[in-house]
Image (cartoon, grey):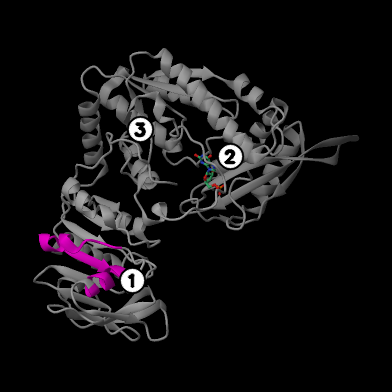
Amino acid sequence: MSANPLPASAGEPQHGGGVLIVDFGTQYCQLIARRVREMGVYSRITVPDRVGTMIEAMQPAAIILSGGPRSVYEHDAPILDPAFLARGIPVLGICYGLQWLTQTLGGAVEPARDGREYGRTEMAVKDAALLLDGVDPQTVVWMSHGDHVARLPAGFRVLASSEPCPIAAAADPARRIYGLQVHPEVTHSAQGERILRNFVLRIAQCRNDWHPGNIVDEKVRRIRELVGETGEVVMGLSGGVDSSVAAVLIHRAIGARLHCVFVDNGLLRKGEREGVEVLFRDEYRMDLHVVDARARFLDALRGVSEPEQKRKIIGKVFIDVFRDKAKSLRGARFLGQGTLYPDVIESVAAHGGATATIKSHHNVGGLPKDLDLVLVEPLRDLFKDEVRAIGRELGLPAALVDRQPFPGPGLAVRCLGEITEARLAPLREADAIVREEIEARGLHVGLWQYFAISLPVQSVGVMGDQRTYENVCAIRVVSSQDGMTADWELLPVEVLRKISARIINEVRGLNRVCLDISSKPPATIEWE
Ligand code: XMP
């Protein structure tokens, strides 16, 4: 994911009174932001060199400085202009954040005794002042640092210590500056949530009005403001959670002036197109344009089996098809998109060095800027779980809101080798069987994804007295928090037996079923 340089849109924050989180490069930044939002308080992440601008734009009631992998005394440590400290906004520094505060305000930071203090430890509370109010005298916390504070700046006092780290929590209450060497945002810190709540709700007194109902009202109001009385919006609707929630929000704001485009690329799952038509055209009464581009996609993919090439072709053809359709909807000056916050967060990681491209992702949000349309992105500051909560608030069916992710390139990345309708049809049937058997038993709750893959390998089988020579199919069932890592999950044996028997008996073209028992990493969730 990368920082998105797209212009301001209907998702930009106007939500004063929240928490601004400064990313010093920690892997936990999004976790901090989500913990704050779970308290009903708006939060936003920014990089150190944008702090001044973001304070002006957002008017935060509190600032949290995150941890980070550097040492404050290294020459390439992140630079942050300390001018904001004079504004009197309550500040909480976590790990590197505390070390930065210490060094900036005249204290001393040094390497930890044994080089690194890592994992679970007991913290002894010495001063149950506001930050640690209600925290047990001895509490389990999580730490992960190579440096720690050796001497606090003038005005600070120690609030808690742990065995390896004498200054585990500190405060300068007069200046409302607080620091933690330990990580309250991770669940391993038993009372981390209480500590964060003390800072956000009691010390900083942030507004806790970030709830689905309020969010919907605010989004609808902002969409109306942006689009005006007569503006028209065109948007690609995939039937996935993000584009569906974005479309329903925009529809609530401007009704028939939203024109949705659903592209049937021939790589969809069984019943997918019909499901979108019934829900959005018949039930929501949206202006839905279904473009049948099956032949166009399959023609472009003919003879191609290299995964990256497939992905690139599908992305390009999608843009061409969408562009043609958008042009035919002449009145539209706005483009609706279901872009989420993790796609646009300005993070140190996103600004950092090159990372290897594992797969070039494609989704309906990835449209080019030369369409010359103003973006309407109502989900641009929301995390996925918040989008789901809003979907429920808007009355979208649970089957859609909680639906498993389905990649933009569709079945193409699950039909290994060359893609033909003759190979897609059995895959579609096998995938439907996997879904039916799992969902009918409620086993999908807690699973991230469950699907079938068609391999470009044929095997010999016997049906009746006849020899068969058909393709092999694999089943992949995984759990995951965010798709970045995943574990394979074992379905009950009787369910596997049923899935296998049904696929082999009911689906012509597949005569063998295998189980994928690979975790991510080192495998990926999709096979291509
Ligand atoms: P991998 O295969 O990289 O997938 O482990 C991680 C998650 O991303 C989904 N995925 C995609 N989603 N466009 C999408 O919108 C894509 O091109 C794409 N490729 C993979 C995948 O289903 C899994 O949830």
Say whether mark 1 is within 8 Å of ligand 1. Answer: no
Secondary structure under tag 1 reads loop
Q: Is residue 236 above or below residue 17?
A: above
**As drawn, 235 above or below 192:** above
Q: Residue furthest front?
A: 75
Separation of marks 2 and 3 at Cα, in angstroms: 26 Å
Which residue does the numbered mark 2 point to in the structure image?
435
Q: 444 or 193, which is in the foreground?
A: 193
Find the magenta span and give its range.
Answer: 79-103
User: Hey, which quadrant is residue 326 in on the image?
Assistant: top left
Mark 1 or mark 2, earlier in chain: 1
The answer to whether residue 97 is magenta is yes
Q: Determine the residue positioned at 36% across, 53% down.
A: 347
Mark 1 residue type = Ala
Disc 2 residue crowd, few under 14, some 14–19, many 20+, Cα 10 Å: some
Type of amino acid under label 2: Arg
Tell me the quarter of the picture where residue 349 sits. Answer: bottom left
Pair 2/3: label in front: 3
Queried on whether the Cβ of the residue with tag 3 lies below 8 angstroms from ligand 1, the answer reads no
Asked which quadrant contains residue 226, the reply is top left
- Picture coordinates of residue 192 (x, y %)? 30, 68
The image's mark for residue 190 is 1
Residue position for label 3: 246
Amino acid at circle 3: Ala
Which disc is residue 273 wearing?
A: none
Query: Which of the marked residues, 2 or 3, is nearer the chain's N terminus?
Result: 3
In this orientation, does residue 137 appear? no
